[in-house]
Image (cartoon, helix red, strand yellow):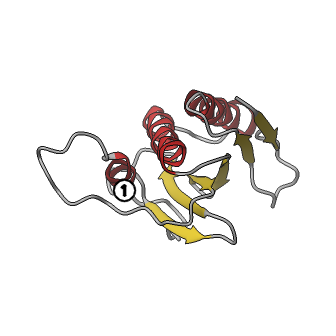
Amino acid sequence: MGQTAGDEGQKTGDSEPVSASAAFDGDSSCIGAARHLATGFLTDVRAVHGVRVSERALGMTQLVVSELVTNAVKHAPGPVMLDLQIDGGAVRVSVWDSDPVLPDVASTDPQRVGRHGLEITLAVSQGYEVHREPVGKRVTALIALADDPGGSIAGRTPF
């Protein structure tokens, strides 16, 4: 597994976002490494920057990172890039891979085993978008940092 990290939760100024990123070789070992990066990032955001991050947000971020990186590893050859950014009261999770085919949610089938990653991501995220890039695509999910039964993110409109 190869990993290159940048920013690692460092804040460069009041208007600069807090972010972390990593590039992985794209083998299955990167899934755990990506979850570990997300956990460390949100732990630092909480401890160093004093941002309120609920346990639910931490768990949902780990889940979304795991699902998106797993999909990238399974369906795209080559490297995978993970970007995490604090955006208002949310964490923006973006995963890039080399496959230009956009993901879609499989039709409901109670007999289906697997292929639920995108459904899970949509269910726990306050925002979701997919963009083709010059090479591949970028899948982005927005997860609220504070618990809110209404699912809204204070002061922010998702995407």
Q: Residue furthest left?
A: 110
Residue drawn 49% across the image and 47% down it: 68
Residue drawn 73% across the image and 42% down it: 22
**Residue 110 visible in image:** yes
Residue 72 spot, x, y in % from top left: 53, 48
* Image quadrant in which the N terminus is located: top right
Residue 105 spot, x, y in % from top left: 31, 60
Q: What amino acid type should be assigned to the residue bearing mark 1? A: Leu
What is the secondary structure assignment of the residue under circle 1?
Answer: helix
Quarter of the image for residue 99 reads bottom right
On screen, residue 82 versus residue 66, left or right, reads right
Badge 1 crowding class, 10 Å Cα cut-off, few under 14, some 14 to 19, many 20 or more, is some
Residue 44 spot, x, y in % from top left: 70, 32
**Residue 156 visible in image:** no
Residue drawn 73% across the image and 43% down it: 23
On screen, residue 91 versus residue 146, left or right, reads right
Question: Relative to the observer, which residue lies in front, 129 or 78?
Answer: 78
Q: Residue furthest front?
A: 77
Residue 35 spot, x, y in % from top left: 57, 32
Q: State whether residue 150 is above or below residue 84.
A: below
Q: State whether residue 65 is above or below residue 125.
A: above
Q: Which residue is mark 1?
A: 122
Q: State whether residue 34 is above or below residue 82.
A: above
Quarter of the image for residue 8 reads top right
